[in-house]
Amino acid sequence: MILMDLDEHEMKATVSSLQPNGASIWPHAGNFAGIAQVMAESGISGLDGLLADLGVSSMQIDDPSRGFSYRRDGPLDMRMDMSRGETAKDLLGKLTEAELAEALRELADESMAGPLSRAVLARHRLTPFETTTQLATFCETALGRPGENWSLRQGKRWVTHPAARLFQTLRILVNREVANLKHLLRLLPSILNPGGKACIISFHSGEDRLIKQSFRDGLRQGLYDSISEEPMTPTEYEKKGNPRSRSAKLRWARKTIA
Ligand SMILES: C[S@@+](CC[C@H](N)C(=O)[O-])C[C@H]1O[C@@H](n2cnc3c(N)ncnc32)[C@H](O)[C@@H]1O
């Protein structure tokens, strides 16, 4: 089994959790968009199965030094691969207001995309945000009521922290998550063996739309002979034990047997 993760620490933890099952694992720290090259180097011509578990892990979110969480103080980093690339702070220094606003709308459905991007970038030009808490506190003042307890569930709905959508957007941009997923979806028919199955778990409605569309296109073109009609979602029991699973959707596609 080939196991890939952009984050070397995460990859090692996943290897340790799988090893007791007796799986023989070939770990590769790297981008799954480069799977074809890894297969070529490993002498593998096709895959019988592929599971892509997208997004960020709980371990990454809960480690303040990674800068993914608006609830924990840390550097404004958010890179899954800490050995290269631009941090969230670097990105804030490069994005225009229009680019950030568009990303906030597209990647997080942020209704205050324009005013938020204007306020955040104006402040960042004046005094750059260095830490997650500085950015989160600024968003509270810009969009919300300071001091409000955002972690509470009010009535039947969760109260979204004013920084949540901005943090999600920055993380997706920093790690080029949309481009990586599109690349993987394009590659899939050429790396699966006939009858091989790809399963993709996403946590974001935009990603789920891309996966659904790509699988439907593949079915129409005869590249896949079967795809999931509806996404699989976690049970109430799983959501209770692991609340972060609540937005997960799994879709699958099977490559046509020629
Ligand atoms: C939801 S977590 C799943 C982690 C692991 N499967 C587990 O259950 O413990 C998603 C993982 O995907 C990794 N990741 C995200 N985009 C990636 C990419 N383009 N290439 C490789 N790994 C990626 C992240 O670093 C993160 O560790």
Image (tube, grey):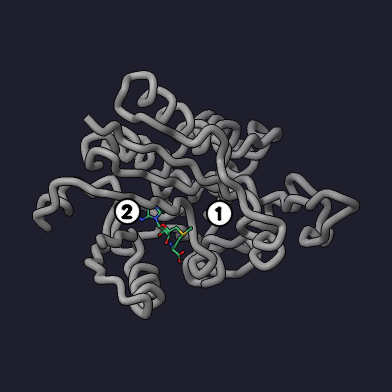
Mark 2 lies on residue = 85
Q: Is residue 222 left or right of residue 70?
A: left
Q: Residue at x 49, y 36 (%)?
A: 228
| Residue 63 percent coordinates (x, y) | 52, 72
Q: Nearer the viewer, residue 179 or 97?
A: 179
Q: Which mark is residue 64?
A: none
Whether residue 125 is visible? no
CA separation, marks 1 and 2? 22 Å
Ligand 1, what quadrant?
bottom left
From the viewer's perspective, tell me whether residue 190 is left or right of residue 40: right
- Outermost residue, right direction? 155
Marks 1,2: beta carbons within 8 A = no
Residue flagged by tag 1: what amino acid is it? Thr
Q: Residue at x 32, y 68 (%)?
A: 8
> Residue lying farthest top?
220
Q: Quadrant of residue 3?
A: bottom left
Residue at the image position 26 percent from the left and 33 percent from the top: 257
Give 59 or 237, whichever is nearer the viewer.
237
Q: Is 196 placed above or below 234 here?
A: above
Residue 216 screen position, x and y as percent: 44, 25
- Secondary structure beneath dot 1 equals loop
Q: The disc labelled 2 sits on which kind of residue?
A: Gly
Asked whether, in this view, residue 38 is left or right of residue 76, the answer is: left
Residue shown at the point (47%, 52%) measured from the top left: 55
Ligand 1 is within 8 Å of the C-beta of the residue at disc 1? no
In the picture shown, does residue 19 fall above or below 222? Answer: below
Could you say which quadrant of the image residue 182 lies in?
Answer: top left
The crowd level at tag 1 (other Cα within 10 Å; few <14, some 14-19, many 20+) is few
Query: Can you identify the residue that label 1 sits on?
Result: 127
